[in-house]
Amino acid sequence: MEGLLDVRGLTLSVPMGAGARARLVDGISFAIGKGEIVALVGESGCGKSLSALALLDLVPEPVRVDAGEILFEGRDVRRLPERDKRRVRGGGIGFVFQEPGAALDPVRSMGEELVAVLRRHRGLNRQDAESEAVAWLARVALPEPEKRFRDLPHQMSGGMKQRAMLALALAGGPRLLVADEPTTALDVTVQAQILALLHDLREGLGLSVLLITHDLGVVAETADRTLVMYAGEIVEEASVSGLFDAPRHPYTRALLASRPTVRDLPGQRLRAISGNVPEPGNRPPGCAFAPRCPSVFERCRGERPRLEGEPLRRAACFLAGDSGEGRAA
Amino acid sequence: MTSSGASASLLRVEGLSKSFAARGLFGGARGTAVPAVRDVSFDVPPGQTLALVGESGSGKTTTARLVLRLLAADAGRVTFDGVDWLPLPAGELREKRREMSVVFQDPATSLNPRLTVERLVGEPLEIHAVGTRAERRERVRALLARVGLPEAALSRTPREFSGGQRQRIGIARALATEPRLVVLDEPVSALDVSVRAQVLNLLLELQETTPSRPAYLFIGHDLAVVRLLAPRTAVMFRGQIVEEGPTGELFSNPRHPYTRLLLASQPAAHPSERKRGGAADAVEGGPPAPRGCAFRGRCPSARARCAEEEPQETVDGDHRFRCHFPS
Ligand SMILES: Nc1ncnc2c1ncn2[C@@H]1O[C@H](COP(=O)(O)OP(=O)(O)OP(=O)(O)O)[C@@H](O)[C@H]1O
Ligand SMILES: Nc1ncnc2c1ncn2[C@@H]1O[C@H](COP(=O)(O)OP(=O)(O)OP(=O)(O)O)[C@@H](O)[C@H]1O
Ligand SMILES: [Mg+2]
Ligand SMILES: [Mg+2]
């Protein structure tokens, strides 16, 4: 597959006091091909959103990029001159922020925002930009887009803000869409329409998508390939069917097991993974999942397993060797 | 002011309505008002959970804000713990508020970014002067541990957390005063499945073991979660409750076509079950019908009568729905 984005050794940290720094994201590498939909899943706080922001060189203070290359269409985003960087943001790469309420300008209507994006990145005149903006609001399944055009963020429901963000991210005609939990506030009927829209854009325009989601149903429905993160590292990479049929990392297996299913009884307790993710700056020397792992053994506590093997089926686990499938279950 | 005893509900909502002024592409506010919540009624018994599900933009959050009195209703009546809630004067409201708390949909904008987690979670305890300072500190620590956040979180501000961690701060804050009713607006939507399982287990456990036995008004999109948590479910569409009943029955025998569409649109559990646009039909783009059923534009079984006459509520045992041609 033709490469579009290539992330190599991305490392992020925050100051921890007394001059020390805590690693939040620890040397992750991954690539996204043209027209590929890649899902990024993982425990809350494992570094998904920060990694995504780093793709646009937008990590917030006091978080810092310590190392890593972000090659988008062959050029390192972080080394681009400011002007080209701005062109990548919203032009080459569209971004949907996790919490739209905080990302949208509270005093600008979504229509105006869209018009601004369309003029900046697509060079449309005001009139064309307005009709194109209305068309985008309709494409993201917002009912009555003309009437909604001048709505300010506080006048929109949670799911409407989310769809407005998506329209903004797509209107600039990006080659890559980075969408951080883009459907959490949508009911399943609208969610299905949004996922269908992403598929259409991929089929029609070759759009690539990095989809950050905790919803394994969305992964099953949309992704070609999945990256699983845990405590700042990618611990498994698999094709979507490989992930569901033969998960290799014990964390991935535990994640799949904690889904509520239609077979659960009312009031029944779900299978949560016991314990918590280690705090950044306080991660164990060996495998970060070792303290919570049902299959942990001596070696895991002293040595860090590496992500090895084919890109479509690899896991950072000593038990995930070629014949190790299911052994750690 | 106390309950007559005749009613078994902790929260009773009757005929609640709210409209907002309309805006358009050309020009500012115009005379017409857009109804966001129309004639909504439901009951939440003490210690129980009612789920509110439905279309995005159907009025779920607005209903919650009306109940919380963060927004003034145009019409309707709310009875909370036997008290006529909407006309309650400010002084009494402040006192009674402790019994009703909320977790908002968007934690990034609902938590004060300048306060530390310790202050944020402890604030409701301070406002209501619960316990001594030392007891409050202890309480805050215990709450944080229960939602799975480390002690180191105490001195940090909301911005220093991930989206899911922020949501857990909101949950700890809402549970601080041991309220009798907690309004939960998509409290687990931002959480990964494992942390979500922890939080749902916690909500169930708190409901069973806290002396105040909190009732929940739970707004959510994930029907598997709703099934687990709520014995009753109300489905909203365009500002109205279009169906309400016992959750199991509503899911196995939906009467309203929108409920059927919701059930059919659940994402696949496995990649081999992908639908690819099967269940998802287009959202109608035109203005809402001036009369008739609001769902008819998307309804597979709509007939002439649906365009003429708005369906009234039909009650069938403890199940109710608004549809001329229910299944
Ligand atoms: N501004 C900040 N200052 C300090 N620490 C931060 C900051 N932002 C995030 N962190 C920490 O970095 C880690 C990763 O955060 P990130 O937002 O990337 O998580 P995430 O994987 O997106 O989680 P979620 O699924 O909950 O959104 C978390 O432990 C978080 O506490
Ligand atoms: N302050 C406001 N001013 C104007 N319109 C508003 C305001 N608050 C809500 N609305 C409108 O009321 C309707 C209902 O919104 P509400 O937030 O209650 O929906 P919701 O069911 O919670 O949706 P979601 O699932 O997307 O969060 C929407 O059309 C919204 O745009
Ligand atoms: Mg995040
Ligand atoms: Mg809402």
Image (cartoon, grey):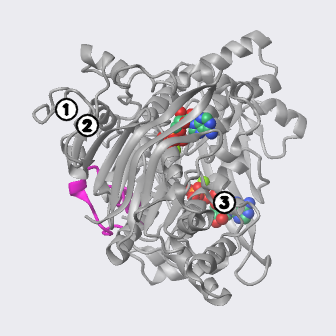
The numbered mark at residue A315 is 2
Mark yes or no: residue B255 visible: no
Q: Is residue B145 left or right of residue B104?
A: left
Mark 3 crowdedness (10 Å alpha carbons): few <14, some 14-19, many ≥20: many
* Displayed quadrant of residue B287: bottom right
Q: Position of residue B86 (x, y in %)?
A: 79, 46
Residue that appears at 84% across and 46% down: B87
Q: Earlier in the sequence, mark 2 or mark 1?
A: 2
The numbered mark at residue A320 is 1
Mark yes or no: residue A31 visible: yes
Specify the amino acid type for callout 3: Leu
CA gap, disc 1 to disc 3?
A: 43 Å
The answer for which chain carries disc 2 is A
Disc 2: residue Cβ within 8 A of ligand 1's nearest atom: no
Q: Position of residue B152 (x, y in %)?
A: 61, 21
Specify the amino acid type for callout 1: Ala
Disc 3: residue Cβ within 8 A of ligand 2's nearest atom: no
Question: In the rendered structure, are the residues bearing label 2 and label 1 in contact, judged by CB atoms less than 8 Å apart?
Answer: yes
